[in-house]
Image: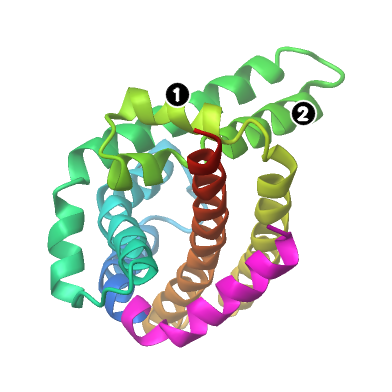
């Protein structure tokens, strides 16, 4: 299992199933983008406070388990040569909504905690905080898959993810870097580009750009799932 093969397979899967991926995720991503834009546009342009940050996380927490769960179920079904409909996938994902929501809260709380602990060290604090957050994100990378595919509870999923990623840290880290860096750069570029539309109230442009960025961000989940399948095969052979 080389990263090159995983990346090629993920790209092929993404474009081969782009229509169904869009049908699964775009409705929820559009809702998220519209809510965010409406709230930020209604607030004074020079005010970016805790309410805006809280809303951003709250909207993401509310919608992410649905489309992320549906995407995971779609990938798992295709791995079994099954072709469920979009409605069936969303309906099935809703059954995992509560545990995925709890898991999301746990994972993000843990990452924020390690960042805060890292910042306690004055000089190397920023780099230590970043490294701890990245390390934790890598070790938690499979937790969602264990909830949906192994029907584990959030606590067990976290433990299983730590165990499953033990020997694949740098492979998963490479996946994060390769998929996250272009996404961050695109987000920064889009943010600067959208500044010129703030005064003209171009809601459609802002909503479209945010939605497209979110769709591009889904590629990371596909890559991680491909790595998960490979590690699962290895765990089965060694069991």
Residue topped by disc 2: 126
In the depicted view, which residue is nearer to us: 36 or 202?
Answer: 36
Residue 67 sits above or below residue 99 on the image: below
Inspect this view and state whether residue 42 appears: no
Residue at 48%, 77% in the rendered image: 212
Residue at the farthest right position: 123
In the depicted view, which residue is nearer to us: 21 or 109?
Answer: 21
Residue 30: mark in rendering: none
In the depicted view, which residue is nearer to us: 180 or 51?
Answer: 180
Q: With 232 as the anchor, is 9 left or right in this view?
A: right
Q: How many marks?
A: 2
Residue 159: mark in rendering: 1
Q: Which portion, as a residue range, is magenta? A: 1-21
**Residue 8 on the magenta span:** yes
Residue at 14%, 69% in the rendered image: 88
**Earlier along the polypeptide chain: callout 1 or callout 2?**
2
Q: Position of residue 227 (x, y in %)?
A: 57, 54
**Residue 203 on the magenta span:** no
Please tell me whether the stretch drawn in magenta is mainly helix, strand or loop. Answer: helix
The kind of secondary structure element at disc 2 is helix
């Amino acid at each position: 299992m080389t990263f090159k093969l995983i990346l090629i397979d993920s790209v092929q899967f993404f474009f081969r199933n782009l229509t169904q991926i869009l049908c699964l995720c775009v409705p929820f991503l559009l809702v998220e983008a519209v809510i965010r834009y409406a709230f930020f546009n209604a607030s004074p342009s020079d005010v970016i406070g805790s309410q805006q940050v809280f809303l951003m996380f709250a909207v993401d927490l509310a919608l992410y388990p649905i489309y992320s769960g549906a995407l995971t179920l779609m990938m798992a079904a295709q791995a079994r040569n099954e072709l469920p409909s979009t409605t069936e996938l969303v309906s099935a994902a809703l059954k995992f909504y509560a545990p995925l929501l709890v898991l999301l809260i746990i994972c993000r709380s843990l990452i924020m905690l390690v960042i805060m602990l890292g910042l306690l060290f004055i000089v190397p604090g920023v780099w230590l905080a970043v490294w701890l957050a990245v390390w934790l994100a890598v070790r938690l990378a499979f937790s969602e898959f264990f909830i949906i595919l192994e029907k584990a509870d959030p606590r067990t999923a976290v433990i299983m993810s730590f165990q499953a990623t033990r020997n694949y840290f740098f492979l998963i880290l490479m996946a994060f870097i390769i998929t996250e860096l272009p996404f961050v750069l695109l987000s920064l570029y889009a943010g600067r580009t959208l500044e010129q539309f703030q005064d003209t109230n171009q809601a459609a442009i802002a909503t479209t750009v945010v939605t497209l960025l979110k769709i591009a961000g889904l590629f990371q989940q596909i890559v991680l799932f491909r790595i998960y399948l490979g590690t699962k095969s290895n765990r089965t052979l060694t069991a």
